[in-house]
Amino acid sequence: MANLTELQKISTQVRRDILRMVTNAKSGHPGGSMSSADFLTALYFGVMKHNPETWTRSGKGIDAFILSAGHLTPVYYSILARSGYFPVSELSTFRFFGSRLQGHPCIEKGLPGIFQTSGSLGQGLSAAIGMALGKKLDKDENLVYVMLGDGECEEGQVWEAAMFAVHHKVDNIIAMVDWNGQQIDGKIDDVAGVGDLEAKWKVFGWETIVADGHDFEAILEAYKAAKEATGKGKPVMILFRSDMGHGVDFMAGTCEWHGKAPSAELCEKALAQLEETLGDF
């Protein structure tokens, strides 16, 4: 498991990967990928039980992660590659025709680390709950993790799944929301007004934790509390307060970069703010 200094170095490199991938492809979603980079880095390198060398899509004997906010593949692919699931050099093929690294996670080409095709927002939580129930049937004590976006929480299926998980006591799942307050059309509160997500998830019956999504100590403490809350009859939700575009001054805190790639010039300006720590692809 990586220490705090190592986690910071990995997440910084992940942000560099994100920027270079979307710039190279001239498309993609850097904003939410940047805001979720820290807590997903902590999950893969400091919390989750997984092994790229023995990984199978069945998920038996390991923890599993499903990306419900499927457009955030830049952060997902970078972390999988940096974890050893496939060569880091393959990141250069992101969104290219015929690449395994499609714009949304896909199982068609057998990319290691991907349990579930996702992209139609709102469906990933249902899939993760199904996988968690499967683990219970198999008497597999490992956990299922799933990440949603806060804009995604406008989808009705999310709340149907939330009710189902509580009713059926699916207590081996840890969901998380990238709570950055932005979506493609503007601020969450201006578009649909999902309001206080903490109050909503609590009233739906989930054990709910709120944490700073850019403070590794707080992130690890949140995961620890979440794991301790599993197995007690309730599903668990971590709401990570985050900043869209975090790490680059002109991208942070705005929806402008939700789904837009920077120019080569702006990419270099952004990379100058992020130290290369593990070597670029």
Image (tube, helix red, strand yellow):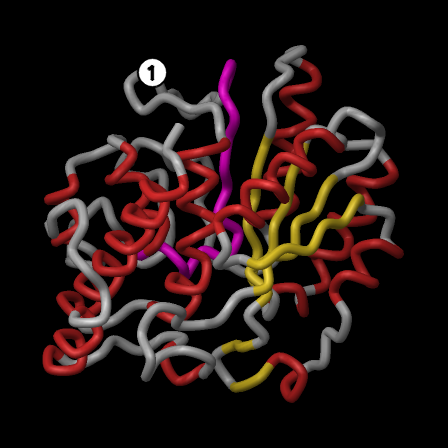
Residue 118 locus on image (x, y percent): 47, 50
Horizontal relation, residue 90 to residue 248: left or right: left
Q: Quadrant of residue 2?
A: top left
Residue 11 locus on image (x, y percent): 33, 51
Q: Quadrant of residue 166?
A: top right
**Which residue corresponds to the image point at 33% horizontal and 80% vertical from the top-left?**
249
Horizontal relation, residue 102 to residue 71: left or right: left
**Which residue corresponds to the image point at 16% horizontal and 71% vertical from the top-left?**
272
Q: Nearer the viewer, residue 241 or 182?
A: 241
Q: Nearer the viewer, residue 14 or 123?
A: 14
Residue 86 locus on image (x, y percent): 21, 34
Q: Is residue 62 above or below residue 249?
A: above
Residue 124 locus on image (x, y percent): 57, 48
User: Are there few (<14), some (14-19), or many (20+) residues within 10 Å of tag 1?
Assistant: few
The amino acid at mark 1 is: Thr
Q: Which residues are magenta?
A: 60-74
Q: Is residue 67 magenta?
A: yes
Q: Is residue 172 magenta?
A: no
Instruction: Please name the residue that numbered disc 1 is placed on.
Output: 54
**Which residue corresponds to the image point at 49% horizontal and 71% vertical from the top-left?**
243
Q: Is residue 114 above or below residue 104?
A: above
